[in-house]
Image (cartoon, grey):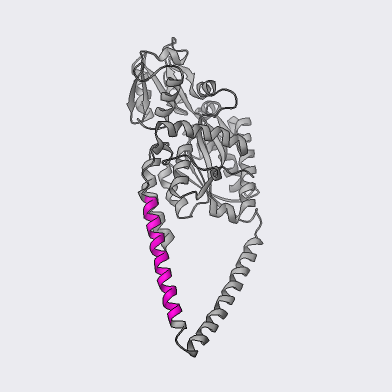
Amino acid sequence: MKRKAIAVIMSAALLAAAAVGCGKGNDTSVTNEAAAADETAETQDGTDEAAAADGSAEADAGQEDADAEQGADAAGESDAEQAASADDGQTSESVEVRIGSLKGPTSIGLVYLMDQAEKGEASGNYTFQMAASADELLPQVLSEDLDIVLVPANVASVLYNKTQGGVSVIDINTLGVLYVVTADSSIRSMADLKGRTVYLTGKGTTPDYVLQYLLKENGLSTDDVTLEYKSEATEVAAVLAETPDAVGVLPQPFVTAACAQNKDLSVALDLTEEWAAVQGEGGSSLVTGVTVVSNSFLETHPDAVDLFLDEHRASTEYANEHVEETAELVAAAGIIEKAEVAAKAMPACNITYIDGADMKTALEGYLQVLCEQDAASVGGGLPGGDFYYQR
């Protein structure tokens, strides 16, 4: 009950960070409340133990009680050992892995595995839940109702900090999906944005941080470029459709949809490529989505996690090699409404599978950039080295 209560309190603090997909984190009040709850429980436990000690010192009857308690403890230990033994008897194929993901590009590399699991053809035992926003998934991670989730990269860092290291990132599933879109053919570099107005979603969200970082690295600032914020990507697309020389930053699949509706629009800059250019060889990558596991599940079922990683890699490879077939699965899953739009958008969604040391290099540097602009965007500080799972 205590765990559930703390989970409810903590999940409320996380919702603000995840509401935009890659938004700001909150303060550390939840952590303090959880710590206070733990301290209260520990104090109560200490009181109970003291009372038990006083009672056991009363008389011979107390000694008999102590003997009985020792016997009960021994029986409890035996039961625990039997339970552990039974758990150890589970194979990585038989352990149920509960997976949550979002209706967006981060799930495209997962849909083939979802289809295989539904047909009974996957090696592992998986159940899947797909949500419209991270708000629906994070409370279930805190309450341990989900074992693995696919979430925005900065939300994973927020989750790590709020749970005091209770989760690990196991792979990167999506690199950058942000593009500069315009009908103005004169925009060919970041430098060409000087003196222009750029429309984008969400002040203080990942697109904002990424764009401002790239402007700075190219010798520009918000004094040189006016940033006009909209609430949703559809609003940015509407401005681009109505104003011929407007410049906007959009994520996939909105880029593909906007360009399909207005033949004058095209991609002027790929922000993933622009990020790579300023980072240089061996630098970090622009990261959109990562896969996170609860450490309690990882510690109990490491083989099941490793099996999932193998199947996630294979599913991602299938998505990149069989675009048309995967597009049908994407549409069926409700990630992108139409298969033809999905097929056009997928090559630009940067669906990937990166784990181990390469994952750490790519993600650690990306989170560092966000943290330098606003520490709250990653949960107040960078995750420790234990955040990065390497098998």
Q: Residue at x 53, y 22 (%)?
A: 273
> From where the camera sits, is residue 327 visible?
no
Asked if residue 373 lies left or right of residue 111, the reply is left
Residue shown at 42% from the left, 23% from the top: 258
Near-viewer residue (20 or 65): 65
For residue 223, side relative to residue 297 (left or right): left
Q: Is residue 309 left or right of residue 231?
A: right
Q: Is residue 216 above or below residue 49?
A: above
Q: Position of residue 200 (x, y in %)?
A: 37, 25
Depth order, front residue of 136/342:
136
Residue 381 in view (yes/no): yes
- Find out whether residue 387 is within the magenta segment: no
Residue at position x 62%, y 68% in the image: 81
Please give the range of residues in magenta.
30-54
Q: Residue at x 39, y 13 (%)?
A: 194
Q: Quadrant of residue 212?
A: top left
Residue 255 in the image, given as x and y percentages of width and height: 45, 24
The answer to whether residue 276 is above or below residue 5 is above
Q: Quadrant of residue 223?
A: top left
Q: Position of residue 30 (x, y in %)?
A: 37, 51
